[in-house]
Every structure is written in C-alpha cells, then in structure tokens.
Amino acid sequence: MPAAPSAAKPRMSRSAAAQARSLAEIRRVAELLKQVSDPTRLQVLMLLNECERNVTELCNDLGTQSQPAVSHHLALLRHGRLIEPRREGKHNYYALTDAGRKLASVVNSVVG
C-alpha cells in the first residue's frame, strides 16, 4: 500500500525567509522614521539623547511649544516605543529606550 501524501506545510526557502524577515525589519524601520518625521519629535528625541527630562524641561528647551503640544509628541514617541517614562513624585521623566538611542545615534551620524 503506498504511503499517504504528507500534509506538512510547505517550507519557505532560506532566501524567502530572509526576505520576509528583511521586509519586517524594513517596515519596523519605516515606522520608527515616521515617529521622528516631525521636527519637534526629532528635537525631543535628540534632547532626550543628552539626558532624561520632564515635560516642563522639554517645553523650556523647545522654546515655542506649549505643554499640551509637547505632551502629545511624547505620547506619540512613547507609542512608538522610542521613549519610556519614569515617575518621580508628581513628575514623569522621559528617557530613550534602546530603539530610541539607536535612532538618535543614526540621526547624529547623518547630521554630524
């Protein structure tokens, strides 16, 4: 009696798997770049690359941005996992995540 055909899933070739992984990485990088496509968010990223800051400090450093506007930019950067908050008393201090530090390093290499 002949063996029944295998019902196994077709395997992806190594190049197809690498290409799929590469496409996923490219999409992730595109999302990160979208996060800093706004000049204010890019400034916030670079300021946080120097040291962690709270919203009031960021407003002072940015000069023309209101507290609600800065908070909105921080929320978008937090959603993109580029920054993370740390609570101290009644203030949240923001710092870069590993992804945020890597992106800031890339920006520094392009600008510098």
Image (tube, rainbow, N blue to C red):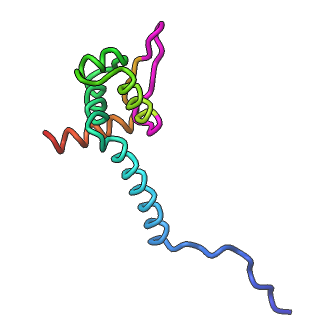
Outermost residue, bottom direction? Answer: 1
**Depicted 9 relative to depicted 4: above or below:** above
Residue 87 x/y as whole percent: 48, 15
| Nearer to the camera, 62 or 102 | 62
Question: Seen in the image, is 54 located left or right of residue 40?
Answer: right
Question: Magenta stretch: residue 48 in it?
Answer: no
| Nearer to the camera, 5 or 28 | 28
What span is in magenta? 79-92
**Depicted 60 relative to depicted 96: above or below:** above
Question: Seen in the image, is 2 located left or right of residue 60?
Answer: right
**Depicted 17 relative to depicted 79: above or below:** below
Residue 15 x/y as whole percent: 44, 71
Q: In percent of the image, x 23 and y 41: which residue is there? A: 107
Question: Seen in the image, is 8 located left or right of residue 112?
Answer: right
Outermost residue, top direction? Answer: 89
Q: In percent of the image, x 44 and y 16: which residue is there? A: 92
Q: In percent of the image, x 20 and y 38: which residue is there? A: 108
Question: Magenta stretch: residue 89 in it?
Answer: yes
Q: In which quarter of the image is residue 81?
A: top left
| Nearer to the camera, 9 or 43 | 43
